[in-house]
Image (spheres, grey):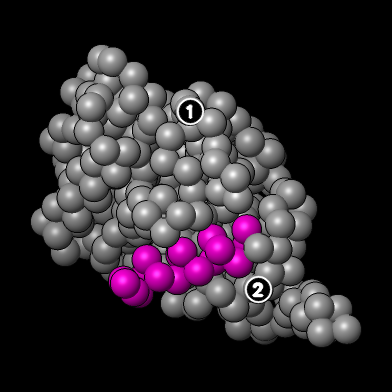
Amino acid sequence: MAALLSMTASAAAFGATSAPAQSILFIGNSYTFGAFSPVRRYNANLVHDLNGDGVGGVPALFKLFTQEAGLNYDVSLETAGGSTLKFHYTQKRQEIDRAWDHVVMQEHSRLDPDKSGDPTNFKRYAGKLAALFKQRNPSVDIRLLATWSRPDLTYKPGGHWYGKPIEAMGNDLQKAYAQVAGGDASIHGVIPVGSAFNRAIRDGVADPDPYDGISFNQIDLWAYDHYHASTFGYYLEALMDFGSITGKDPRSLGSYEKAADDLGLSQGQAEALQNIAYRQLHQAP
């Protein structure tokens, strides 16, 4: 009975607010649109895909979470596989050059596709995009989304982080994102998704090495290419977006959260990932 009441209360929250919608734009690549998972096309009708590709992705998960929380966000995304912020600035400015209340920007998984770990172009074009959005709306909330370690670049010979712990790439990316955000007053902070992946591994929720099989009662954060995220990984990414942008506790979504149920997560898995997001956002031990 308690479970039924929880589900009913969550459903009743949909559209429960009369507050004006806050506009939010997600800029990124396959890490934002949910490549190699059912997240890619999930609830695409809830968001505005500015490229017309029919993508729902992580932004649609964020939208659903806000509906469940009784919040009103008008969600748009502009994504392209393998792209950098330089690409979005030079090739997609026409689609995104407007006033937004919130903007989330995600750089290439290696920062620079030609120079792994080099933040030079990231810094330059994050700054250019931030200035563009700031000109349209001086009070816009701009955040960077720091991405995760790639097992293919960690466990396979020749990878830039080969021979280092799986957490190393995510730690390096977080430092670069923090450096870029810290050097530009227009950027309000970093959503530490890669650090949340590392926390999930450290806390035993996720398996650290998909190449040797997934341990019992753990999840695989990565897709079959050991590069992109799995459904679990994208769910965690969306929880981090939700908690960071709205200020709400991700745990408030509960074990009966709709997207988790739709996408095949167990109640325990949903709760575990919500708890990881909360702990990372609040830097709990």
Expressed as whole percent of the image width and height from the top left, the position of residue 226 reads: 47, 28
Q: Would you call the spot at circle 1 few (<14 residues within 10 Å), some (14-19), or many (20 or more)?
A: few
Q: Viewer-proximal residue, 213 or 184?
A: 213
Q: Is residue 282 left or right of residue 52?
A: left
Residue 177 seen in render: no
Q: Is residue 16 left or right of residue 220?
A: right
Q: Which residue is most to the top?
A: 158
Q: Magenta stretch: give its range.
A: 269-285
- Kind of residue sitting beneath label 2: Gly
Q: Is residue 143 above or below residue 215?
A: below
Q: Would you identify the image quadrant in which residue 20 lies?
A: bottom right
Q: Quick one: quadrant of the N terminus?
A: bottom right
For label 1, the SS is helix
Expressed as whole percent of the image width and height from the top left, the position of residue 80 reads: 48, 31
Which is nearer the N-term, disc 2 or disc 1? Answer: 1
Q: Is residue 277 above or below residue 236?
A: below
Q: Would you identify the image quadrant in which residue 119 lies?
A: top left
Q: Is residue 29 magenta?
A: no
Q: Residue at x 50, y 78 (%)?
A: 248
Q: Kindly identify which numbered label has been placed on residue 105.
A: none
Q: Which SS type dominates the magenta stretch?
A: helix
Expressed as whole percent of the image width and height from the top left, the position of residue 83 reads: 39, 29
Q: Is residue 183 left or right of residue 243?
A: left
Q: Residue at x 74, y 49 (%)?
A: 264
- Kind of residue sitting beneath label 1: Asp
Q: Which residue is mark 2?
A: 254
Q: Would you call the spot at circle 2 few (<14 residues within 10 Å), some (14-19), or many (20 or more)?
A: some
Q: Which residue is mark 1?
A: 212
Q: Residue at x 50, y 77 (%)?
A: 249
Real-space CA distance between mark 2 and mark 1, rounded to the nearest whole angstrom: 32 Å
